[in-house]
């Protein structure tokens, strides 16, 4: 059976950056453009599901210190080879607590990850603890519009004949998480795109701010 962990420890990793380029995957550029005004050189940025580092690369260029968390040793090895991250932790995002202290990060980003999670509560719960008040979290989710199913089965590209489930998030569902874990929405942007290996769909990029400690 194909698992997300297997996919990101397979040959998929070898061509990951090339494939992202081939499909003109813009999520990292979108969140950077939306979050840029809130960050300063020297700020600490945690990349949730950092993979090979695509979502924090532009923040690195802008002078931020990059930290990452991911459960794939292969993706982390690729990221490490770019020598842009201060520290990378191998950890499953569905398991709390994450290996970072309270109020230890200024900001966080997450792209290409949320569609793999049925429930984003562990991520929001942990960022509610790890981010300093006033910190920004910029992320992208597949958008679930009214009447659409939030779980769909797609072909597992690396295991012919097999299917994987991917998840989408309505604005209402995101609002509930923000309220529960002490964030406010600053702004969001809806766009259509083709994520790596998946169909063209509607996505939503959010910039939210941590307001208080829970
Ligand atoms: C499509 S890649 C996105 C990587 C990177 N954020 C980017 O924007 O290119 C998804 C990443 O999420 C990681 N991932 C998926 N599920 C995870 C989990 N439960 N815990 C930790 N990492 C996970 C994978 O290992 C992979 O590196």
Image (cartoon, rainbow, N blue to C red):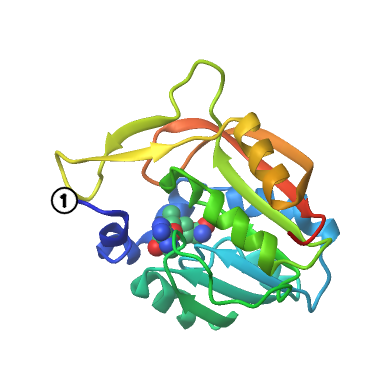
Q: Nearer the viewer, residue 82 or 22?
A: 82
Q: Nearer the viewer, residue 154 or 106?
A: 106
For ligand 1, the image quadrant comes to bottom left
Please say whether residue 18 is visible from this viewpoint.
Answer: no
Name the residue located 68 percent from the left edge and 65 percent from the top edge: 129
Q: Residues within 10 Å of mark 1 (few under 14, many from 20)?
A: few
Queried on whether the Cβ of the residue with tag 1 lies below 8 angstroms from ligand 1, the answer reads no
* Mark 1: secondary structure: loop
Above or below, 119 against 95 in this view is above
Above or below, 186 against 203 in this view is below
Left or right side of 127 for 69: left
Left or right side of 135 for 117: left
Please say whether residue 23 is visible from this viewpoint.
Answer: yes
- Residue 106: image x %, image y %? 76, 70
- Residue 154: image x %, image y %? 30, 35
Name the residue located 71 percent from the left edge and 76 percent from the top edge: 104
Left or right side of 162 for 63: right
Name the residue located 70 percent from the left edge and 36 percent from the top edge: 189
Q: Quadrant of the C terminus?
A: bottom right
Number of marks in the rendered image: 1
Above or below, 39 against 159 in this view is below
Q: Nearer the viewer, residue 13 or 170?
A: 170
- Residue 20: image x %, image y %? 46, 53
Q: Quadrant of residue 175?
A: top right
- Residue 33: image x %, image y %? 75, 52
The residue pinned by badge 1 equals: 1
**Residue ranking furthest to the front:** 214
């Amino acid at each position: 059976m194909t698992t997300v962990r297997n996919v990101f420890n397979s040959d998929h990793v070898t061509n990951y950056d090339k494939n992202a380029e081939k499909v003109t995957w813009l999520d990292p550029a979108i969140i950077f453009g939306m979050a840029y005004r809130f960050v300063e050189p020297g700020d600490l940025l945690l990349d949730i599901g950092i993979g090979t580092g695509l979502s924090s690369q532009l923040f690195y260029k802008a002078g931020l210190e990059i930290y990452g968390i991911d459960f794939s040793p292969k993706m982390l090895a690729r990221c490490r080879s770019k020598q842009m991250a201060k520290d990378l932790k191998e950890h499953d995002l569905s398991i709390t607590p994450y290996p970072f202290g309270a109020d230890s990060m200024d900001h966080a980003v997450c792209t290409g990850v949320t569609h793999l999670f049925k429930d984003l509560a562990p991520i929001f719960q942990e960022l509610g603890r790890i981010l300093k008040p006033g910190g920004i979290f910029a992320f992208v989710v597949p958008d679930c519009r009214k009447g659409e199913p939030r779980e769909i089965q797609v072909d597992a590209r690396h295991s012919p004949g097999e299917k994987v489930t991917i998840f989408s998030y309505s604005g209402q569902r995101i609002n509930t998480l923000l309220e529960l874990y002490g964030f406010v929405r600053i702004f969001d942007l809806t766009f259509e795109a083709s994520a790596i290996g998946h169909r063209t769909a509607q996505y939503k990029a959010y910039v939210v701010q941590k307001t208080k400690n829970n």
